[in-house]
Amino acid sequence: MTPQVTPKRLSLLFAPVAFGMLSACGGGGGGVDIAEGGIRGTGSSVGPVSGFGSVFVNGVRFETDGDVISNDGIGSEAQLDKGMILRIDGEWRTNGQGTANAIEYDDTFRGRVSSVQKTTDAEGRIVRVSFRIYGQEISADKLTVLKGRSLETLANGDFVRVSAWQLESGSYRASYIGLITPDETDVEIEGRITDSSTDLGLNRFEINGFLIEYDDDNTEFRDGVVENDLQTAGLSVEVEGELVEISGRPAIQAHTIGRDDTRRYRRGDADDIEFTGPVSSAFNNTDRTFTINGLTVLVPNDDVFEDGLTSGDLVSGLLVQVEGAFRSDGVVVAEEIELREADSEVEGAIEPGVIDFSARTFRLGGVLVQVTPQTIITDDDDDQRLTLNDLNGRYELEVEGIERSRLDGSVFLEAVKIERDDDDTDNEYQMTGRLGEINCSVSITVLGVRMDIISATSFDDENCSQLESDFRDRGLRPLLEVEYIKRNDGTFWAEEIELEDD
């Protein structure tokens, strides 16, 4: 029988990719190689910055005047970093180009890190960090862009700015974390008002248990928020102000109180919108809707799903990109929905001269990596804006991406994020991906790379024969983590194979 992916989500692994659309300039300067086209959308585009040379958001290169609307000390494009979530009002065309009439940026959090907890994988590598800023829970993962810190070095006491999405639980998933100069007279948080915490007589309320105090004369209410709204339990608001102590308790003396970051997704002068974010409430089969970033999205039919994604994949927390248009009632009718959550990765040293700049591809440990306009290329250096050109050397790369396949069955990794490190490990690689082929007496294939199975190959807690039997007889393609070695003749052998949690 034909092998099938076990989780429904991974049906997208067999979907074709239109390489004409992928040839656009991603993660850095240059032109777009696809043919000129007409207007695809007029309205707002909201998502993380993926490149510069103007600004790349949601795969579109927006021409800008260089100005940014923000009250967080960022007034120009030159002050932006990859991973920061922007709102761009303007138009975008079918050729991947766009024109920005206005760019807005606002920190989700700005303040001091506490309660850091780090999650490791089976190899002891840090894959997730959770922490708090003034009582609000935030998580960072391998798709988060960090500047001045890394998942390994983020620590209690760090003073950072964070650009993030609110999750259904009320916690936040960080798209960007940047180390900045401490200033506790200018901090920012957002979150849901704690039930029964508001006292209008004392001018106080709590956000997820953290005390906020405001002043009738010196606190500005904005974005349509008024004082009486603070009595609405569960309302999510943004507060900027000064860190103080009230009766021995840490608190924020509010300078401004307004709507939270869902205002990024407000309807503009035109109806079209494209945005990226994690699903809040899962797809409802009855009314064919799901929620994301405070918006209700209607899925009119299954034709809107790209690259094999299905309605069943739209579970809480899944990172997706949506393009659609507002209805008169504020519901967004989806026209395209695509996955932006990485499901595979490869790590190791890139060799000089292996990049095909015209196709925007390279091989890393045998894996064909495709760079797109949405690919974020970064390191933890505060001052560098990396492009594909900056990978042309002897560097250690970690590529998080989405496994795709062409019509001819060949497999590639569509890069979501590429992180560069100056260190390198000679001929040693590590990958995570779905089982593609296996013959226990010969070889195993993952992410399109054939690796010999030899006597030194270790199967941690796994039986190779069982893997092969499940693959042949039941079509199971489990997620595997493989450490492997490149020989001098360019072939590979698997050193260690381990079943990875889905």
Image (cartoon, rainbow, N blue to C red):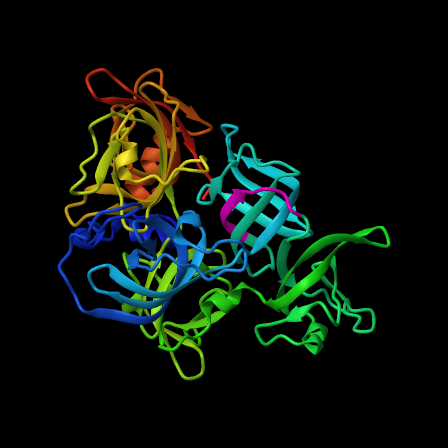
As rendered, which of 455 and 332 lies closer to the eye?
A: 332
As rendered, which of 143 and 478 lies closer to the eye?
A: 143
**Residue 62, x across and y down, in percent:** 30, 59
* Quadrant of the rendered image containing residue 200: bottom right
Q: Residue at x 59, y 37 (%)?
A: 118
Q: Residue at x 65, y 70 (%)?
A: 220
**Residue 434, x across and y down, in percent:** 34, 40
Report if residue 174 lies within the magenta region: yes
Q: Is residue 328 left or right of residue 228?
A: left
Compared to residue 485, the image places residue 416 above or below, namely below
Q: Residue at x 27, y 39 (%)?
A: 388
Compared to residue 261, the image places residue 384 above or below, namely above
Q: How many marks?
A: 0
- Residue lying farthest to the bottom in this orientation: 328
Q: Is residue 476 visible?
A: no
* Quadrant of the rendered image containing residue 401: top left
Report if residue 215 lies within the magenta region: no
Q: Is residue 369 left or right of residue 6?
A: left
Q: Is residue 498 left or right of residue 246?
A: left
Q: Is residue 54 visible?
A: yes
Q: Quadrant of the C terminus?
A: top left
Q: Is residue 211 left or right of residue 402?
A: right
The region drawn magenta spans: 173-183
Dominant SS type (magenta): strand
Compared to residue 481, the image places residue 344 above or below, namely below
As rendered, which of 474 and 298 lies closer to the eye?
A: 298
Compared to residue 423, the image places residue 478 above or below, namely below
**Residue 438, x across and y down, in percent:** 28, 32
**Residue 268, x across and y down, in percent:** 41, 75
